[in-house]
Amino acid sequence: MEEANEGAAPEETTLSGTPNAAPAGDDGGAYGQPAVMVGPKSSLPKIMGILMMIYGVLVGLMGVLALAVTGDSISEYENIGIEVNSIFMWVQAGVGAVVPFVIAYAGNQVRNYQRSGVMMGLYAIGAQLAVSLIGTVLFADAMAEIAGDSALGAAAGGIGAFFQVFCAGICGLLVALPILASADSLED
């Protein structure tokens, strides 16, 4: 059966609206640039920077205390008959007091997402390691005098040097962690 449209208005197929020059999602041609999505910065540099500042201030204050009692330590060594290089003991105490504050300042830079803070922290750890290794070589004889055996003193010096290198390596990895884990969030 066929139905007839009697009395109904004829249907028109017209579109209304404004034509779009480019379809949705088109970048406008061959030379258009894709949209770059930038995520939030990593929070690791902030956390490591704060930890570096806490470490630097606490150890720096202990270093100042050690610097204050270095003269007494030298006189105690001389009283019990152990010859030490007093000039180097002062240098080592001074470096031990200054380097942690440099690490605290580097931590502030890392907290502010600056790559130079990481490098400054690594340089400070390297300087501390160099002074400590020189101290181990210079005080190996003093260790031998304390032990009464030169072989035992040399072994103690070797063990001390190993642990200094090991600890500096761990500290260096912790300081370098913001670059290793989130280098794109650090600025030059």
Image: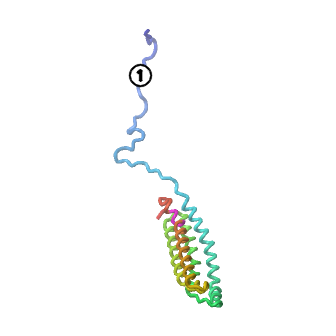
- Mark 1 = which residue? 12
Instruction: Say if residue 86 shows up in the picture.
Output: no
Name the quarter where the N terminus is drawn.
top left
Give the colour scheme of this rendering: rainbow
Name the residue located 56 percent from the left edge and 65 percent from the top edge.
49
Image point 42% across, 17% down: which residue? 10
| Residue 177 part of the magenta-drawn span | yes
The prevailing secondary structure element of the residues shown in magenta is helix
Is 2 or 47 nearer to us in this picture? 47
Q: Position of residue 162 (x, y in %)?
A: 53, 74
Point out residue 171 in the picture as x, y percentages from the top left corner.
55, 69
Which residue is the extreme one toward the left?
Answer: 30
Residue 101 left/right relative to 2:
right
Q: To which quarter of the image does residue 53 belong?
A: bottom right
What amino acid is found at the position of numbered circle 1 in the picture? Glu
Residue 162 inside the magenta-drawn segment: no
Q: Position of residue 156 (x, y in %)?
A: 57, 79
Above or below residue 47? Residue 167 is: below
Q: Secondary structure at mark 1?
A: loop
Label 1 Cα crowd, 10 Å radius (few <14 / some 14-19 / many 20+): few
Q: Between residue 105 and residue 18, name the one nearer to us.
A: 105
Left or right: 64 as drawn, with respect to 126: right
Q: Give the residues drawn in magenta, as a range.
A: 174-178
Count of numbered circles in the view:
1
In the displayed orientation, state which residue is furthest to the top: 1
| Left or right of residue 18: residue 173 | right
The picture quadrant where one finds residue 12 is top left
Please tell me which residue lies in front, 82 or 150.
150
Q: Which residue is drawn at the image coordinates 50% and 73% (left, top)?
A: 123
Q: Is residue 25 visible?
A: yes
Kindly indicate the quadrant of the structure image that contains residue 21: top left
